[in-house]
Amino acid sequence: MDRETLGQRIRALRIRQGVSQAQLAFPELSDSYISLIESDKRVPAPSVVDLLAAKLNCSATYLVSGVSEDVVDELRVTLDYAEIALRNGASAEARARYAEVLANADAVALPDMLHQARWGYALALEASGELEEAAAGLRDLAASASAEADLDHWAKVHVALSRCLRELGDLSDGVRVAEGALRHLVATGADSTDAAVDLGAALLAAYVERGDLVRAGQLAEQLVERAERIGTARARMAAYWEAAYVAEVRGGYEDGAALAERALALAGEETGGDPRGLARLRVCYAGLLLRARPDEPARARDLLSRVRAEISTSADGEIDVARCLTELARAENLLGRPAEAVRLAEEALALLGDAPRRATAGALTVLGRRRRSSAAATTPSRR
């Protein structure tokens, strides 16, 4: 069924209240202007909508959307509940609440709320490990988002899409998404922004995972230079973190650990915070410590144990928890506790399930090494 237009709603309310066009217009507007609005030949400015809503004793939201304030409040509460559930790691609950908003017929008339629900639903899918469905939703969001309207959100959508594609093993597409978005920012003169650093970090991760270490090294240097020029804590933290990742892959574990420490120091300056990002950074740092200083695994193990306790009640998805468990298994192995290492690696694999994921390889590597070591220890030597 077609909804009433803004003009039709104004006319219906005016007639219901026994007010003429001239009376509604006086003294700020003209009756001819009211006539044009009611016939949908003019679209009033937001300030005019607010004025008419006050005169007609209704909300501006109702005039624009036709949705009652009670329904809007109910949808807003549902969205708030979904956001809290997602932050607290209850991805299934968050997914159900976002789906509730998306299924509400009135949400179609509330584009901002509808977009918020679609974005949250995609993140909840990702956190639940439903990567293919999450990537499909993020593609739709990327196609409809506008860098000019909201640069930071536009960048977040493209970063999330690139990340999802990489987790699915589609490294080329993950590179393409991040490269295309970063190229757009450069072309529009928005390359010296936090959004550009975030996209550069996503592209850097994609290069590393694709094995393109030369381009990754070049981009890491550019990213750090750009972040230090911008100067914000968030930009520098993202740049140091990704540069640490490149150093790790290239075998520069001590350099990587130093960069990760700089990123962690900056994390304290962030306002609002990003619990999931901070947990990932700590896991990355602990992994670097294990590789740079394998004779000192206790420090990394203690850090990973704290992170594991935190992420069990945060917005971290199964993949992030599995990565923490995998690094914790490495630490236990170095501490001479092979049984605990195997248990943790198997717990990580159980979380990841049967779907092919990059994180699965890490857990399998730990498990394989431990079993090979056990087999070697029990095989009689040949003389």
Image (spheres, grey):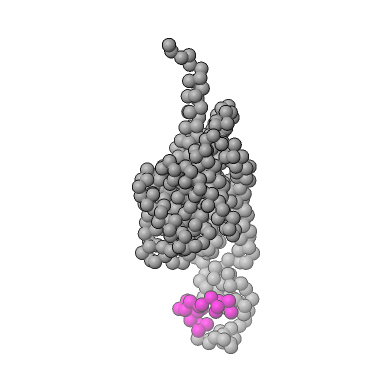
Magenta stretch prevailing secondary structure: helix
- Asked if the magenta segment contains residue 45, the reply would be yes
Q: Which residue is drawn at 44% across and 66% down?
A: 148
Q: Nearer the viewer, residue 218 or 202?
A: 218
Q: Vertically, is 6 above or below 173?
A: below
Residue 343: which quarter of the image? top right
User: Residue 371 location, x and y as percent?
Assistant: 50, 25
Residue 274: which quarter of the image? bottom right
User: Residue 261 location, x and y as percent?
Assistant: 54, 49
Q: Vertically, is 348 above or below 154?
A: above
The residue at the far top in this view is 383
Say left or right for 297 vs 192. right
User: Residue 96 location, x and y as percent?
Assistant: 58, 49
Quadrant containing the C terminus is top left
Residue 144: which quarter of the image? bottom left
Q: Vertically, is 179 above or below 318?
A: below
Q: Residue at x 51, y 77 (%)?
A: 45
Q: Which residue is drawn at 59% across and 36% down?
A: 298
User: Residue 233 location, x and y as percent?
Assistant: 53, 59
Count the numbered circles shown: 0
Q: Is residue 45 visible?
A: yes
Q: Residue at x 58, y 87 (%)?
A: 26
- Asked if the magenta segment contains residue 117, the reply would be no
Q: Can residue 99 be seen in this view?
A: no
Q: Nearer the viewer, residue 246 or 25?
A: 246
Residue range highlighted in magenta: 33-51
